[in-house]
Image (cartoon, rainbow, N blue to C red):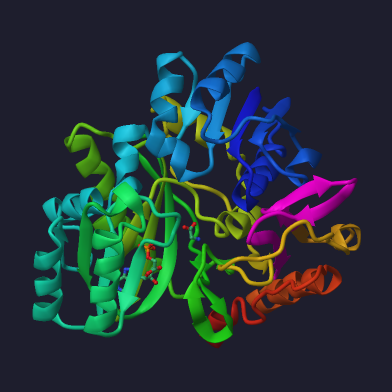
Amino acid sequence: MKILVVGGGGREHALCWKIAQSPLVEKIYCAPGNPGIAELAECVHIGADEIETLCEFAQAEAVDLTVVGPEVPLTMGIVDRFQSAGLDIFGPDKAAAQIEGSKDFSKSLMARYHIPTAEYQTFTDHAAAVAYVRERGAPIVIKADGLAAGKGVVVAMTEEQAIEALNDIMLDKVFGAAGVRVVIEEFMSGEEASFFAFTDGRNVLPLASSQDHKRVYDNDEGPNTGGMGAYSPAPVVTEELHDLIVKTIVRPTIAGMAQDGCPYRGILYVGLMIKDGKPRVVEFNARFGDPEAQPLLMRMKSDIVPVLQACARGELTQDAIEWHDKAAVCVVMASGGYPETFEKDLPIAGLDAAARIQDLMVFHAGTRFKDGQIVNSGGRVLGVTGLGNTVKEAIDKAYEGTALIAWKDVHYRKDIGARALNR
Ligand code: AMP
Ligand code: GLY
């Protein structure tokens, strides 16, 4: 088979790495890819959101299956375009991708199908939104309805912070059209976890559990980021809780989408808040998590390609995925200053030394080639992912890797996986 992976981050590097192990695959293309991916796939200079060009490329190269990493092409309708050209593609179509693309869409879906989540109301009128905040009090959560590159959520600890967020989104329109509607939500306390399931629109194939680290600094301090590290499995998700998540959240969501006439195919990402053994939905995403994909795919024993193809074709019959009986921990090495501004094009040292370590993968996220060197080009630069017999061993393995790698102003958290150890 020839496979095209769309995207160029750590998640897509992990996908290419896993797909490359399949005996079914003879060739992998990645658009646009990155220097790490270039070791496994032919990178093509097409942006992830250039849907027409990607479709022409897939037709010209007779690509058998396209796998979409990021949310933006999904919400733009890449799946609809490929399907109308008769091409197999893994991911939800434009209608189904609204589960991530519109918070109001996903909240109203959850309300209709009694899926446990925070109470909410949606507003288009600023004065009404402010009045609601005054009535409910803080803490309270303000969310721009549309995609805002991970910055559209404000967890406000005071009414003033909440109103400031409403002013930014609704009056100053900092997220443009994504902020025309605003969801105001009850604050949930508890422990977060990420849960993923493959689905063909009807059948559901859950993955192992994982946990992200969203805050930029150790001890979950500082602003939210795209994710500073992840591990799998997540001990907070016991077997009992796993079954409860599938039964009360994943299955009713997939059934509800089908019932509403927009069946969801691809991988469903459920962001969870867990308290007293009960899961509630924080958000849905229409794609694999990044960095969660990195530890998850390193632990996955089954061939991923038949699963991706079956989801794309609406023919998922497999009822279990085999996992390596190991833990995996991914430490994200970021540019100094991230998630704010940072210097780019700084040469990265130590990649060759890290590549020689067993049970360690350095997934590239924000890197590029410049003058024959690999340099940083994004906020999250590398996902250094270690495998071990225990979480402790996997943590040690990942940090053995980070110790070898350096560039000017690099920063990364030193406590990835600590919460799993404390349990
Ligand atoms: P989201 O973009 O929806 O994932 O939100 C980003 C982060 O904000 C989540 O990972 C949570 O840490 C936090 N968050 C979102 N909604 C809530 C909520 N209702 N209660 C508490 N925290 C939340
Ligand atoms: N790790 C968070 C995300 O992929 O959205």
**Placement of 229 over or under 57, stated as above or below:** below
How far across and down, in percent of the image, does residue 20 sit?
71, 37
Left or right position of 300 against 260: right
Q: Which quarter of the rendered picture does the N terminus lie within? A: top right
Q: Which of 357 and 367 is in front in this view?
A: 367
The residue located at (63%, 30%) in the rendering is 46
**Placement of 63 over or under 411, stated as above or below:** above
Q: Which of 321 and 179 is in front in this view?
A: 179
Q: Main secondary structure of the magenta part?
A: strand
Res 47 → quadrant: top right
Can residue 265 be seen here?
yes
**Placement of 221 over or under 24, stated as above or below:** below
The residue located at (58%, 69%) in the rendering is 228
Q: Does the magenta stretch include residue 366?
A: yes
Q: Does the magenta stretch include residue 356?
A: no
Q: Which of 197 and 160 is in front in this view?
A: 160
How far across and down, in percent of the image, does residue 280 sit?
28, 67
Question: Which residue sits furthest front?
Answer: 172
Left or right position of 372 against 415: right
Marker count (numbered): 0
Can residue 187 be seen here?
no
Res 130 → quadrant: bottom left
Ligand 1: image quarter? bottom left
**Placement of 350 over or under 205, stated as above or below:** below
Q: Which of 107 and 168 is in front in this view?
A: 168
The residue located at (29%, 81%) in the rendering is 276
How far across and down, in percent of the image, does residue 375 sit?
80, 55
Which range is magenta? 362-389
How far across and down, in percent of the image, does residue 238 sit?
42, 71
The residue located at (48%, 75%) in the rendering is 223
